[in-house]
Structures are given as structure tokens and as C-alpha cells.
Amino acid sequence: MAIIGQLILAYLAVLGFGLIINIPHQALNVAGWIGTITWGAYLIVQAFDGGVVLGSLIGSIGIGVLSSIAARDKKMPAIIFNIPSLVSFVPGSQAYQMVRNFALGQYRQAVSFMLQVIMITGAIALGFLLAELLNRLIAFGRLQWRRHQIKQS
Amino acid sequence: MTTDELIIATCLKAGKIMVENGSEISRVDDTMMRIAQNAGVISANTYVTITGVMMSIQGRNATQIAAITQRTIDLEKVAQVNQLSREFAAQKIDLPTLQRRLNSLDQASRSFPLWLQLVGAALVSGPLMIMFRQETINTWPTVVIGTLGFLVYYLLNRYLKIKFLSELAAALFIGFGAEWALQIGWGTNVNDIIIGSLMPLVPGVPLTNAVRDTLAGNFISGPARGVEALLSAAALGFGIAVVITLA
């Protein structure tokens, strides 16, 4: 039950961020679904004690690949799908704790939270890079498949 | 205007709209080159940064520059330019029509009205607070303060046009609002309310584009956007830090 609740919340949050940055209304639903699916993947990683960093990496790979597929399908730029879907992966809680501990002078905790923020952000960036690699592979595979089809006919 | 000049002017207009509204650089480059190629120019050079767009045609006497002084986030316009470029490639519209449509697109206002954006802010702040903190007691204070915080940011940004100052003011408002909610017994945890309420203001577009631009090899725009995102984050963090120190 809690998991279904989380997935609904993820959908709503992505929809909300889509409204703020004004993505085309035809794209809102698809972006919401990408956010929901990738948040589900994140929750699965959490269920196996994979940690926040690995979860964010898997999530951002999913976002990169699914956005590219949605972009090709809907004929819209990929950023329209991947920026809103990413909103649930932003390390907002850790970033806030970092600022709070710095302001209160508790530098040891502050640095620990800062490292978490850097690691999560790095994982998301690496995830995008890996997703780009997968996208190129998918495009290459499609091209080869089409060539194969043409040769046979 | 000669044909060369018209081609360059149209490409620059498309590039300018895309950069102004938050597209990544490699897509701008790609779209401008496509428009040029479909207009019959094979050897065009484009140079796109987040503060200006330049274009020339190799071996001809035509070069133009478009300066970009202000940037907002409106991905609908990016998608529209993309759509127009596709229509031009499919030869559904000709070059003067493309330029006219781009000009009217530039003048057009956002498709989502303010109240819908406020609904968006409410949807971002409440659900994300529950997802991050796994509790529901503070949902309503978070939704209300998050929405009002976004409204403060929106109004200040519209009339003052200084993004970082608006973010700072919104962060101060959110911080004091959360403290106030705690004092009248509406919320139970200041941290959770602040975390949720700040989420609509997170610089998601500059951050994502910074990563994408840097990975694509645009070493001028990528780090510049990183600085933009960092300044936004610093403005938000500083506003919150002031509240925490005072409270």
C-alpha cells in the first residue's frame, strides 16, 4: 500500500514540476509515467538495500533511456521528459541538512551530508552518460535491423 | 534582405528562442544546422553559447550575432521551435513563413496560466515532502507554504527581474513561514516543511543542462550553467541559513 502511495506521489510531483517549467501539455502524462516507473525502480533498489546512490544511478539511467524513447515516439526534445522526471531524485533533503548543519556550526555532519549530495549528483550525471551510451546502442541496433530488413526484401 | 541574410536571421531567431527558454546547446546547434541545410546551405558555421548565438555561411559575406541577455524556462517554446523545424524540413512551410512563425512564437506567452503553475508548485512540494521524509503530519503546511513561496518567487522575478534575489526572498519567506507554522502549532517539524516547500524552486533545468552540455563537450556553456545552478542553490541555501541562525 505504501509503495502504491509512493508511486502516485511520484507521478503527481513530476506532473507538478512539468507545470512549473511549462512543458507541452501532450507530454505531461508521459513524463509522469517515466517518473513513476523510475521511482519504482528506485524503490526496488531500496528494498534490496542498494542504497540511495545506486538507486539514483539506476533511476537516472531509466530516465535517460525512457525519455529518449518517448522523444522519438512523440517527436519532441528529450529534455521535456527528463527534466520533470528527475525531480524526485534531487537530493533536496540532504542538501537542506547540509545547509542547516553548516549554519549551526556542526561541520562534521555538514561535510558528511555534502559528500552525500556530491555522490548522488555524480550518480545522476553518470546515469545520464550511461543512458546516452545505451541510446546510441539502441539507435545502432535499430539501424542494423532496418538494413537487415531491406537486404532480405 | 538577401537570401543568405534571411537564412541566417531565421536560424539565429530559432537558436535565440531555444537558448532563452532553456534548451541544451547541442540541440540548438543541431536545429540551426538543420534549418540551414534544409534552406540549401551546406557549409554553415554556428557558435552557440548561453549568452549569445553566432552564425556564418562559409565563403559568403554574411555573418550575424544575436545576444541573449535574459533566460527563462519555458520548454513549450523549445518544443514548438523543434516542431517548426520539422515542418520546414518536410517542406510544409517556406523560409519567410518559418521566420514569421518564429517571431510570433517569440511574442507568445506561456501556455499554463499562473494558477496552474501554483497548482504545480503545490503538487511538487507536498508529495516530495512525503516521499523524502516518510511522514504525512506536515503535508498541509508544506503545501500552503510551498505554493506561497513559489508565488513570492514568481512575482518578484516578474517585476524585479533578478532571479537570484527572488530566490533569496522566497527562501526567507519559506523559512519564516515554516517557523510560524510551528509556533502556531500547525506543523510539527520545521525541517520537513522547509525541505518540501523549497522543492518547486530547485534549479532543475540549469542543473540538468549543465550536465548534458558538459558531457556533450560544450565546455563554455556547461560550466556556465553549472555556475547558474550553483548560484540559485546558494541563494536558496543562504536564505534558509539566515532563518536557521535567527530562529
Image: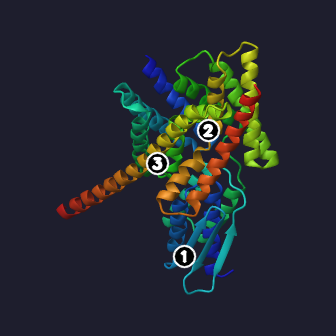
| Three-letter amino acid code at the position of disc 3 | Ala
Crowding near pointer 1: few (<14 within 10 Å), some, many (20+)? some
**Quadrant position of residue B177:** top right
> What is the spatial separation of the Cα atoms under label 2 and label 1, in whole angstroms?
35 Å
* Image coordinates for residue B37, horizontal then vertical, percent: 50, 73
Q: Chain of mark 1?
A: B
> What is the spatial separation of the Cα atoms under label 2 and label 3, in whole angstroms?
24 Å
* Image coordinates for residue A19, horizontal then vertical, percent: 61, 38
Residue B45: mark: 1
Residue A125: mark: 3
| Three-letter amino acid code at the position of disc 2 | Leu
Crowding near pointer 2: few (<14 within 10 Å), some, many (20+)? many
Looking at the picture, tell me which residue is in the foreground, B156 or B218: B218
Q: Secondary structure at mark 2?
A: helix
The total number of labels drawn is 3
Q: Nearer the viewer, mark 3 or mark 1?
A: 3
Apparent side of residue B213 relative to residue A145 in the rendered image (left or right): right
Figure check: A68 above or below B170: below
Which residue is rendered at x = 36% and y = 54% of the image?
A: A133
**Mark 2 lies on residue:** A19
Q: Chain of mark 3?
A: A
Q: Secondary structure at mark 1?
A: strand
The residue positioned farthest toward the top in the image shown: B185
The residue positioned farthest toward the left in the image shown: A152
* Image coordinates for residue B118, horizontal then vertical, percent: 69, 33
> What is the spatial separation of the Cα atoms under label 3 and label 1, in whole angstroms?
29 Å
Say if labels 2 and 3 share a chain.
yes
What colour scheme has been applied to the protein in the rendered image? rainbow
Q: Chain of mark 2?
A: A
Apparent side of residue B247 relative to residue A19 in the rendered image (left or right): right
